[in-house]
Amino acid sequence: MVSPQSTPWIQVSRYSVQSAFWSYVPQWFPNAYLLNPFPRLAVDYDPVAHLNEIFTHPSTLASIPTTSQILRGHVDTLDTQINSLVARQSVADETSLERMIVVKAGLQDLFDRIEGVRGRAIATEDAITAMTADIKRLDATKRNLTLSMTALKRLQMLSMSLVNSETHYFQQIGFN
């Protein structure tokens, strides 16, 4: 028999126990309605009063062996049902524990992947920042080079113009 302390998760509804009880008590049994213990599950239950209700007359004492046999069968059936529920629950607990371990491992793997993606994202952001700085530096160098080339071309044009002007001036004054 299973102790109630070792199986606190088993909960049997009053309705299912009552229906199981009445499925084992034959309807032709004398005083069968008096065998129903469920209204008497109160704290002030008196088993002697209950037995006096079941066996109201000395002639009903002849049904004691039958009543006892029915109640023993009912207790055995309840024990079997409780044991099967306990076995099913322990298997379910083991399966749940295995699933929980698998889920925890999956979550750890997911967190590791997320951390890896985060690390790669930070490295990519740093690389992009460095490339952007290089591009800005190259743009500034290009702008400076373009301005220098423009200034040199203008200086060349000015010097050519000066040379042409001098040549033209010396030709006009007759100084060859």
Image: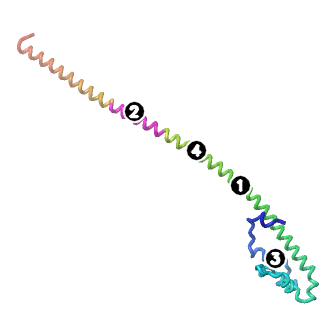
Sequence order check: which comes first, mark 3 or mark 1?
3
Q: Quadrant of the C terminus?
A: top left
Q: What's the CA distance linking mark 3 and mark 1?
A: 35 Å
Residue shown at 77% from the left, 65% from the top:
5
Q: Which mark is residue 21?
A: 3
Query: What is the three-letter code of the residue carrying label 4?
Result: Arg
Sequence order check: which comes first, mark 3 or mark 4?
3
Sequence order check: which comes first, mark 2 or mark 3?
3
Q: Residue 113 carries which label?
A: 4
Q: Which mark is residue 118?
A: none
Q: Name the residue under label 1.
A: 97
Q: What's the CA distance linking mark 3 and mark 4?
A: 57 Å
Sequence order check: which comes first, mark 2 or mark 4?
4
**Mark 4 closeness class: few <14, some 14–19, many ≥20 residues within 10 Å:** few
Q: Quadrant of the N terminus?
A: bottom right
Q: Nearer the viewer, residue 173 or 65?
A: 65
48 sits left or right of 101 in the view? right
Please, what is the dominant secondary structure of the magenta stretch?
helix
44 relative to 115, above or below: below
Q: What's the CA distance linking mark 2 and mark 4?
A: 31 Å
